[in-house]
Image: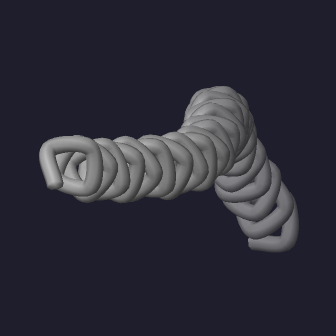
Amino acid sequence: MIASGVEVKISRLESIVEQIGEAVLSTTEAIERLAERVENISDQVEAQGKQLQQQGYQIFALCDAVQSLAEAQNDSLRKLAQLTQTLDRLTSLIEGVDE
């Protein structure tokens, strides 16, 4: 009787140990899947960071190009104003000669 009681306890212990082992394996697999997902997300965040950095460089280059364009336009306007003044003088001179 005592031997059968011990066997029942051993059987229960074996069952408990088996359940613990299965739980540990399931947890380990879940953690591995989670680690893979975290790594994928980390890679995506890193790629997005590089894209943002590249966009920052592009915005900087665009601002520089716009500034250069504005300076060139300002210079063109100055030259156009000088040309207009010169044409006004020539027109005045021509009109003065015709009189």
Residue found 47% across the figure and 44% down from its top? 21
Up the image or down, 49 lies above or below 16; here it is above
Residue 10 position in % (x across, y down):
31, 43
Q: From the image, which quarter does the N terminus lie in? A: bottom left
Q: Residue at left 85%, top 61%? A: 94
Quadrant in which residue 68 is drawn: top right
Residue 73 shown left or right of residue 16 in the figure: right
Q: In this view, does 90 lie above or below 79?
A: below
Rendered residue at 60%/54% (across/down) = 33
Color encoding of the figure: one colour
Q: Can residue 63 be seen in this view?
A: no
The residue closer to the viewer here, 1 or 86, is 1
Picture coordinates of residue 53, whole percent (x, y): 61, 29
The answer to whether residue 10 is left or right of residue 62 is: left
Q: State whether residue 51 is above or below residue 84.
A: above
In front of the other: 83 or 60: 60
99 or 50: nearer the viewer: 50
Taking the spot 37% from the left edge, 42% from the top edge, the residue there is: 17
**Residue 39 is at least partly visible in this image:** yes
How many labels sit on residues?
A: 0
Q: In this view, does 96 lie above or below 18?
A: below
Name the foreground residue: 8 vs 46.
8
The percent coordinates of residue 73 (x first, y second) are 67, 45
Name the quarter where the C terminus is drawn.
bottom right
83 vs 16, left or right, is right
